[in-house]
Image: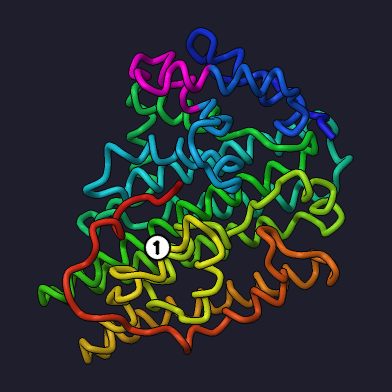
Amino acid sequence: MHGTPTEPTGPSLPGDAENIARLQSTRGRAALTESERDRLAGSYEAVAVDGHATEAETIRLLTRPFSRSERIPEYYRYTSLHVYDWFLAPYGEDPVAAVTLAMRATLADLAAWEQAREDVRPGALPYLPERLARLHAVIGQVDDVVINPVGPVRGADVAHGAGTDAALRWRLYVLTRCTAFTQSDDDNEHIFLRSVHACELAFYLSRWTACRAIVAMNSGDREEAQFRIGQVAACSELIKGIFHALRTLSPEQFMNFREATGAASAVQSLNFHLMELALFGYDPRKSEVFERIDHLRMLNDPPYRAHWSLRGAVLASDSPELSAAFATVERSLMTWRGRHYGFGRLYLPRQLKGSGGTEGAGYLKRFVDKDSCLPGTPGPLNEAMFRFALR
């Protein structure tokens, strides 16, 4: 349970936003009383229409998960992904640098949290040194991501530049403060929640760069396509690295807070399914899953079902270089999917359903291979494939 100082280390959020943030972080959201939830829902409704002033905007970000007027799936209430959408929105034309900044800030915030736990009770939690080592390794991977081949400009360069931009530093601080709310009061839930956040960013960046590679191939620019597929490969390695850090969570630690997290599963994640759609094409085996989950139902219909996949575009290019680059992506993600299946087998008892009501490890096993995916139809890409996705 909470054994870490909960006082924020940065500046206070404006006005009542600070009190709202502290209310949600004290005992975990699941412990909020009905009257407290009413207050948070009321705060959201009060600023939802006109929430552009700094305080109102921050309150809107903090309280959207409690809205009673919007149909928000439980997964999105839990993860507060609308805050990431807010941060990324100004960078829609080219979000790569912004995504790496958001991912680095998310992982650094988690590392600071875990380091504070270690500092309070040095050596008392034997898994923390390895967890911290793995987190810093992933942050190093983010720093190594090539943003621009000219230079090249890497994630570390972007992070260094952000350090001198006061407005950007503030937005990153708001991002991490407004997304740090666990459901339970179990300290180990933080790595689970932050791993979900980091994976969502990696899923989105994989999709965006894959779609840019397809656009490049459509226009005959193989050099650009090669660079973008390389970025997809870097994203796939990030996903593996995040998952490697998450594996420092034992099955017992996971089960201590799992019930409180509700439907916190990639099964409900639009960014996850859209990434797989962009890379491999529509998977008919998923049609039943999409039909069952309201906000995923659209993925069974055009233009998503007919999306021209990166795999299809690479095969059509008849380029050995592009095929080799994409094979690297496929191997990396195949490894991750296999490990995810192994995680489900180890961490979920057979009689327990997976998050979101699936059959847990059995569901994951069905989709380890991507042989059933349809390549899609060549043509212009749907603009929605370039946007961060949430409900």
Task: Depth check: give the residue in front, 156 or 294.
Answer: 294
Find residue 320 and report its horizontal and vertical position in percent: 27, 90
**Residue drawn 70% across and 48% down?**
262
Specify the farthest residue to the left: 219
Would you place residue 44 above or below residue 358 in this image?
above
Find residue 175 and report its horizontal and vertical position in percent: 48, 32
Q: Quadrant of the N terminus?
A: top right
- Tell whether position 55 is magenta: yes
Residue labelled with disc 1? 298
Q: Amino acid at mark 1?
A: Met
Find residue 79 and report its horizontal and vertical position in percent: 57, 43
Q: Is residue 184 left or right of residue 69?
A: right
Q: Magenta span: helix, strand or loop, mainly? A: helix
Task: Depth check: give the residue in front, 216 or 105.
Answer: 216
Range shown magenta: 43-61
Find residue 390 and report its horizontal and vertical position in percent: 44, 48
